[in-house]
Image: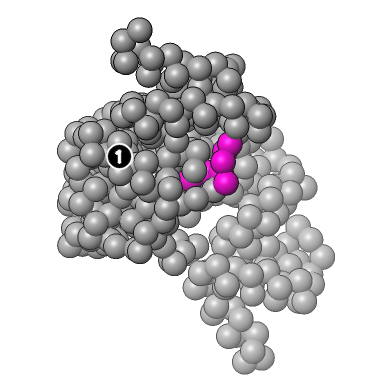
Amino acid sequence: MAAGARVTLRLLAGLFFLCPFFSPFASAEAARVDVPPGEQASAGGGDVAARYAPPASGPDVAQSGSDIFDTESSQPQEYERAIEWYLSAAEKGHVHAQVTVGYMYLTGKGVRRDDAEALKWFERAASQGYAYAEFMLGRMYLQGRGVRQDVDAAASWMRKAAEKGNADAQFGMARLYEWGKGVPHNEAQAVNWYRKAAEQGKGRAQVSLASRYLTGRGVAKDEKQALFWYSRAAERGMAEGQCGLGTLYYNGQGVEKDFDQAAEWHRKAAAQGYAPAQFGLARQTLRGQGVEKDVERAFELARMAADQNYAPAQFALGRAYEEGRFVKADKKEALEWYRRAAEHGSEDAIRKLKNFSAD
């Protein structure tokens, strides 16, 4: 049997032990690049999508980006048996297997977690010009996993993958330009890379691009374009896109004001546990806008958002308890919610606390 055929059989054997859990081409928002290592996104102001991002999913093994494991269903023994076959194929230079082995070491699936070993396998795949491996190297250098943190190296690897059309790397380059990490801070370049990733269907890039058009950050303000990109993300099921679209309908930005549509999109995002949407729906429910007025339900929704540390909801609860609106006035409870909102960046809450201290 030819050597190439034997390598392919080893790879297929690895897949066999993970089936039906292995899905190399399943759609997913791969390997987030959200916040520079050691930094936290601001809870007050800025891009809501960046603050309330969904948990990172595992990296893909396809050039374009997709998840490789069903982490809820796969059993340890499947991973343990699969790694033997993947390692065999990876050692013989099969790039797909090299990336998969790197991911398994990165996440501890079938092997003891080992960032340095993961880095080694991503480097081997990257040496063959594999875009996703280059992206993962950029991510690991950015986070200092398996290697000393180096934002310049992170940007270099990320750019290699981005220029080959990898949407995750394009999104990563946008973030780097936004932060000024490894590249000069440049809002126009951030928009450029967000657009490239968004045009490939990356939902988080679509949300970020929509937010840029809405605020005019790095690009001319254009509410119609914001509507377009929020709609694209919403249609993909992205909670941030659904919430953004609901807000545009609520405010009549780029589209005729429509409380029914606003409530519908806020409801979809709120059902995914997205705090800003829960709070937006609370506001509409309190006022009976596009949904039946229900004070108790509105308070429940606001509390759900506040419990996720969404500062505007925490401030609203503080004000409700301070003024006795919809609940019995309770200064102690009001102070507690103002304190929590202040901790998460609410300038209004900080001012409130100063006023309480002065009284």
* Residue hosting label 1: 124
Residue at x 45% of width, y 31% of height: 87
Q: Quadrant of the N terminus?
A: top left
Residue at x 29% of width, y 62% of height: 150
Q: Is residue 52 visible?
A: yes
Is 209 magenta? The answer is no
Q: How is the image coloured?
A: one colour
Instruction: Name the foreground residue: 351 vs 205.
Output: 205
Residue at x 30% of width, y 50% of height: 138
Residue 353 appears in which quarter of the rendering?
bottom right
Side (left or right) of 284 relative to 11: right
Residues drawn in magenta: 106-112
Q: Is residue 245 visible?
A: no
Kindly identify the amino acid type of the residue bearing the numbered disc 1.
Arg
Residue at x 50% of width, y 38% of height: 104
Extreme-bottom residue of the structure: 358
Say how many tags the image has: 1
* Crowd tier of the residue under label 1, counting other residues whose Cα lies within 10 Å: few below 14, some 14–19, many 20 or above: many
Residue 107, percent across and down? Answer: 53, 44
Side (left or right) of 123 relative to 270: left
Residue 338 appears in which quarter of the rendering?
bottom right
Instruction: Name the foreground residue: 353 vs 329.
Output: 353
Residue 195 appears in which quarter of the rendering?
top left
Magenta stretch: dominant secondary structure: loop
Q: Quadrant of the C terminus?
A: bottom right
Side (left or right) of 64 relative to 322: left
- Label 1: state its secondary structure: helix
Instruction: Name the foreground residue: 214 vs 127.
Output: 127
Position of residue 273 relative to residue 344, above or below, is above
Residue 141, percent across and down? Answer: 33, 56
Position of residue 118 relative to residue 263, above or below, is below
